[in-house]
């Protein structure tokens, strides 16, 4: 999946496409630190997020993965002999 990170600088729009959520988030944070950029958003194939809502969405996704992993049955060790 690719992510589009966009921001405004005066009358110009800056954008970059990244291949991972981690790269998109890092880019958005870097741009936020610059301070002169406005309206920083991250867009996946379905939704557009602010930095704050993207971090919450990614945290919830990670929690869901953790819960799903915990629900999967564990493989029993092979018997020796």
Image (cartoon, rainbow, N blue to C red):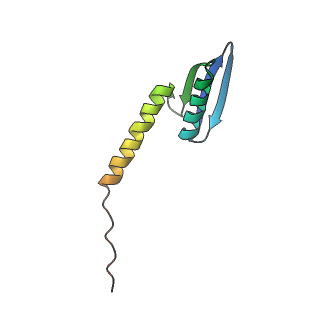
Residue 63, image quadrant: top left
Q: Position of residue 9 (x, y in %)?
A: 66, 17
Say which residue appears at 60% left-offset and 32% top-offset. 27
Camera-nearest residue between 37 and 71:
37
Q: Position of residue 35 (x, y in %)?
A: 61, 19
Say which residue appears at 48% left-offset and 31% top-offset. 54
Looking at this view, name the residue that lies furthest to the bottom: 81
Q: Is residue 39 above or below residue 5?
A: above
Camera-nearest residue between 76 and 34:
34
Q: Position of residue 38 (x, y in %)?
A: 59, 17
Image quadrant occupied by the N terminus: top right
Say which residue appears at 41% left-offset and 40% top-offset. 61
Image quadrant occupied by the C terminus: bottom left
Residue 44, image quadrant: top right
Q: Position of residue 33 (x, y in %)?
A: 59, 25
Left or right of 51, for residue 36: right
Left or right of 37, for residue 73: left
Looking at this view, name the residue that lies furthest to the right: 12
Camera-nearest residue between 23 and 42:
23
Looking at this view, name the residue that lies furthest to the top: 11
């Amino acid at each position: 999946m690719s992510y589009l990170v966009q921001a405004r600088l005066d009358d110009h729009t800056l954008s970059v496409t990244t291949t991972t959520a981690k790269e998109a988030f890092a880019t958005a944070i870097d741009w936020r630190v610059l301070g002169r950029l406005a309206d920083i958003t991250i867009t996946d194939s379905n939704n557009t997020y602010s930095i704050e809502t993207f971090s919450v969405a990614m945290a919830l996704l990670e929690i869901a993965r953790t819960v799903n992993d915990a629900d999967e049955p564990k493989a029993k060790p092979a018997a020796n002999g």
